[in-house]
């Protein structure tokens, strides 16, 4: 029983480490993109993932929820290629600079 519990804890720790690594990376990229778009006078930004695995989409949804709390409007979508073999994810962020 102890070995099974220990194995589960190790697996959870590994998953959380990977999740946090992706979270930091995507947050950095998204905020950099929003800043760049705002400096150029745009009121929207779109971030795409080439591979929409479950963990990556969960991270995008968490970031979208956090951006919503700060007044951004977000939309997270999963799309498939025409042949249906590949899925990709997109986070659309919009904001209104006038209030």
Image: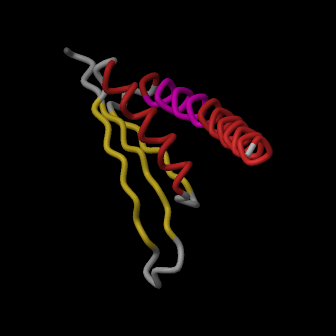
**Horizontal side of residue 98 vs 34, given as left or right:** left
* Quarter of the view holding residue 63: top left
**Horizontal side of residue 84 vs 71, given as left or right:** right
Examine the structure image and report whether residue 32 is included in the region drawn in magenta: yes
Tell me residue 94's x, y (percent).
31, 34
In the figure, 86 relative to 17: above or below? below
Task: Give the mark count.
Answer: 0
Front-lying residue, 95 or 79: 79
* Quarter of the view holding residue 13: top right
Front-lying residue, 87 or 13: 13
Residue at the outermost front position: 1
Residue at the outermost right position: 3
Most common secondary structure along the magenta stretch: helix
* Quarter of the view holding residue 5: top right
Examine the structure image and report whether residue 79 is included in the region drawn in magenta: no
Residue at the image point whose x is 54% and y is 53% from the top: 49
Residue at the outermost top position: 99
In the figure, 93 relative to 82: above or below? above
Front-lying residue, 19 or 32: 19
Q: How is the image coloured?
A: secondary structure
Front-lying residue, 51 or 96: 51
The segment highlighted magenta reads: 26-37
Tell me residue 99's x, y (percent).
19, 14
Residue at the image point whose x is 24% and y is 24% from the top: 96
In the figure, 94 relative to 51: above or below? above
Residue at the image point whose x is 60% and y is 28% from the top: 28
Tell me residue 61's x, y (percent).
41, 40
């Amino acid at each position: 029983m102890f070995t099974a519990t220990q194995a589960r804890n190790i697996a959870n720790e590994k998953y959380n480490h990977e999740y946090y690594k992706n979270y930091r990376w995507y947050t950095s990229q998204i905020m950099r993109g929003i800043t760049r778009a705002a400096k150029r006078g745009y009121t929207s930004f779109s971030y795409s993932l080439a591979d929409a695995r479950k963990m990556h989409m969960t991270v995008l949804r968490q970031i979208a929820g956090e951006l919503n709390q700060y007044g951004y409007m977000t939309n997270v979508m999963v799309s498939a290629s025409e042949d249906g073999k590949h899925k990709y994810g997109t986070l659309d962020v919009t904001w209104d600079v006038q209030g």
